[in-house]
Image (cartoon, rainbow, N blue to C red):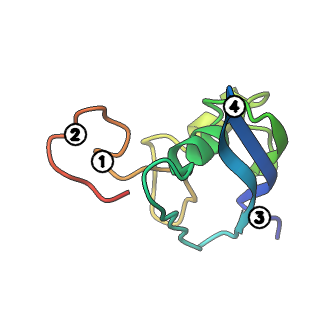
Amino acid sequence: MPPVIEVRNLHKRYGNNVAVDDVSLTVQEGEILGILGPNGAGKTTTVECVEGLRAPDRGEIKVFGLDPLRDRAEVTPRSSNSWRPGTPTVRRPPGCSSPRPRSRATC
């Protein structure tokens, strides 16, 4: 079975700052992945690239075998709030994407 999420050699820069440097990962159906690291390590940028919210500078991303930037209309319904048990999704914990979370969240 093909992976639900596949990231190969992901690179993303903001000007001279390297945010993501050659990240690769694979998530199979039923697996849970956590991304840990200090502030500025590229966690949010990696997730935003996987969600199709940011374009990577280099590398390849597939979600359900689709490109999240090019095939956003097909990927989004599969990873939206219409989740049902047993359905793979791309999600962030509550508070992780808010500039002012109501409570501290560990992302």
Picture disc at residue 101: 2
Above or below residue 23? Residue 56 is: above
Residue where numbered disc 1 is placed: 94
Residue where numbered disc 3 is placed: 3
Find the distance from the CA under tag 3 to the CA under tag 1.
Answer: 25 Å
User: If you read the primary sequence from the N terminus, does the residue marked by circle 3 or circle 4 appear first?
Assistant: 3
> Please, what is the three-letter code of the amino acid marked with disc 1?
Pro
Kindly report which numbered mark, 3 or 2, lies closer to the viewer in this rendering: 2
> Please, what is the three-letter code of the amino acid marked with disc 4?
Asn
User: If you read the primary sequence from the N terminus, does the residue marked by circle 2 or circle 4 appear first?
Assistant: 4
Give residue 101's position: percent from left, percent from top: 22, 39
Regarding mark 4 in the picture, which secondary structure is present there? loop
Q: Are marks 1 and 4 in contact (CB under 8 Å)?
A: no
> To which quarter of the image does residue 84 belong?
bottom left
> Please, what is the three-letter code of the amino acid marked with disc 2?
Pro
* Quadrant including the N terminus: bottom right
Residue where numbered disc 4 is placed: 16
> To which quarter of the image does residue 2 belong?
bottom right
